[in-house]
């Protein structure tokens, strides 16, 4: 079985969501069933880039993770693109037998049996500004596919007040899922420096909105990797 | 019983450590048994500022937290100074009866029975650059004082390579405590703007050090509130 891999990099730290700050090796898959208007990972999404994706066996993926981490167990994040398009059963079995932990980041549009073996499943339903529409039945299939030990969390990117209202409604559907909000990043060109203060200002806007509304259940976090490294790849 | 309170403010988000991003009201107490060389809260530590501290009853502290949060339960962080000098039994009982959660941030030099009722105890043993010396027996008394439901975590501020080596040894003593590392902030004057890039550079240094050493157990986080608000008080 061959996996389509856009890039494998790390160890670095997870820059967002529930595992923010956690030392992580990222396995970024190629291919996605969504085309979010503000996608920051088009090199792993748009099939125009497919010639840059590497066909790799599960063993080859695992060998690379092990090499990058020097054989010391850590968290491996399966991201994309949408990693749920592909089958990570074997990669996870190889890693977990050596004490590695696995997190998967997906929009929640496709459920896979291997979700059951994940330590963490981050579901990121896409708000209206993405141009995509969430199918909540598919989303619930993803939750149902997780195992007893899987920590399931929801992360929503917020670009504007409309996204914010949508996130509140989504949170209302799933009151038991820990929720992480993060401000959207419209500066996604890897060749341009990010505007740090603009990025911090979007975070300030979101903090102000949530706290002034007295909505105290979500945690609000920035994209720390964007503050640290801009849109540079491989960190 | 009267509490010495330096400030009560929020709701804002927790800027560091295990609860980073969490909507929080802060109760900052006055007085501290330590004098860290790089203290960023001297207004709550140095007794030269004691005339700015407010003598408040537990009811008055609680009323102010409830007013600021509009009566909607959230996390209340007891910080300082060293909040463990004082008795928060009554404040916590008032808040927890209404669904509020309590976190306490302390160096771990003084244990109190009310630690047993905390949801989160953040122990921040101070590294050599602080000029203080940790008494590990006292530190362990703090852990022993927590309850079955208390999440206990360790947070260590790192200013230099010596602090870093010390943190690795401290982590070795307590392998079961989740560990958070954060780069130290030498720019603590509330009247001066912070140098954002310097702050990010210190974070990059620490990430590079941890990942290149293959030390994958700690999470590495910045002081997010400093990036967002500088050293401004009350946010």
Image (cartoon, coloured by chain):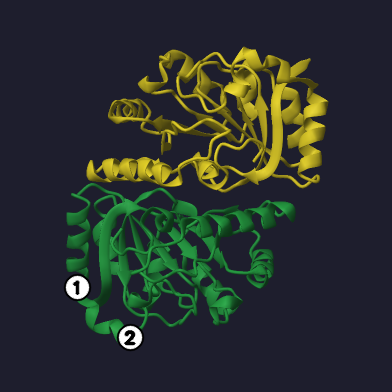
Chain colours: A green, B yellow
**Relative vertical location of residue A107 with respect to residue A68 in this rendering, above or below:** below
Residue at 57 percent of width and 33 percent of height: B190
At horizontal 23% and vertical 41% (from top left) the residue drawn is: B213
Q: The N terminus of chain A appears in which quarter of the rendering? A: bottom left
| Category of crowding for the residue at label 2, using alpha-carbon neighbours closer than 10 angstroms: few (below 14), some (14–19), many (at least 20) | some
Q: Residue furthest front?
A: B192
Residue A156 visible in image: yes
- Residue A188 drawn above or below residue A70: below
**What residue is pinned by disc 1?**
A57
Question: Which residue is at the far bottom?
Answer: A48
Image coordinates of residue A67 in percent, x first then y, are 17, 55
Q: Secondary structure at mark 2?
A: helix
Front-lying residue, B42 or A131? B42
Which residue is located at x 53 percent, y 30 percent? B189
> Which circle, 1 or 2, is nearer the viewer?
2
Q: Earlier in the sequence, mark 1 or mark 2?
A: 2
Tell me: B27 left or right of B32.
Answer: right
Q: Quadrant of residue A54?
A: bottom left
Q: Which one is in front, B81 or B90?
A: B81
Q: Is B211 placed left or right of A214 in the picture?
A: left
The answer to whether residue A67 is left or right of residue B232 is left
Q: Are marks 1 and 2 on the same chain?
A: yes
Q: Which mark, residue B109?
A: none
- Regarding residue A88, the answer to whether it shows in the image is no
Task: Give the SS element for disc 1.
Answer: strand
**Coordinates of residue B135 in the picture (x, y in percent):** 43, 13
* Nearest to the observer: residue A44 or residue B227: B227
Q: Position of residue B174 (x, y in %)?
A: 38, 28
Q: Which mark is residue A47?
A: 2
Q: How many marks?
A: 2
């Amino acid at each position: 079985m061959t996996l389509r891999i856009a890039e494998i990099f790390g160890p670095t730290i997870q820059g967002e969501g529930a595992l923010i700050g956690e030392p992580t090796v990222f396995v970024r898959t190629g291919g996605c069933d969504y085309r979010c208007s503000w996608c920051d990972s088009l090199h792993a999404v748009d099939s125009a880039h497919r010639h840059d994706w590497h066909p790799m066996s599960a063993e080859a993926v695992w060998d690379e993770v092990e090499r990058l981490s020097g054989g010391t167990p850590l968290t491996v994040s399966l991201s994309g693109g949408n990693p749920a398009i592909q089958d990570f059963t074997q990669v996870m079995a190889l890693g977990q037998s050596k004490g590695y932990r696995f997190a998967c980041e997906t929009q929640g549009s496709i459920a896979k049996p291997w979700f059951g073996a994940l330590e963490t499943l981050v579901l990121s339903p896409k708000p209206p500004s993405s141009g995509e529409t969430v199918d909540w039945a598919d989303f619930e299939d993803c939750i149902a596919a997780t195992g007893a030990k899987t920590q399931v969390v929801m992360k929503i990117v917020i670009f504007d007040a409309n996204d914010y209202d949508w996130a509140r409604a989504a949170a209302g559907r799933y009151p038991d899922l820990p929720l992480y909000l993060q401000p959207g990043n419209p500066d996604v060109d890897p060749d341009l420096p990010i505007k740090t203060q603009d990025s911090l200002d979007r975070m300030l806007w979101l903090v102000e909105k949530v706290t002034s509304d007295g909505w105290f259940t979500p945690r609000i976090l920035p994209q720390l990797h964007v503050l640290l490294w801009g849109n540079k790849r491989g960190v």
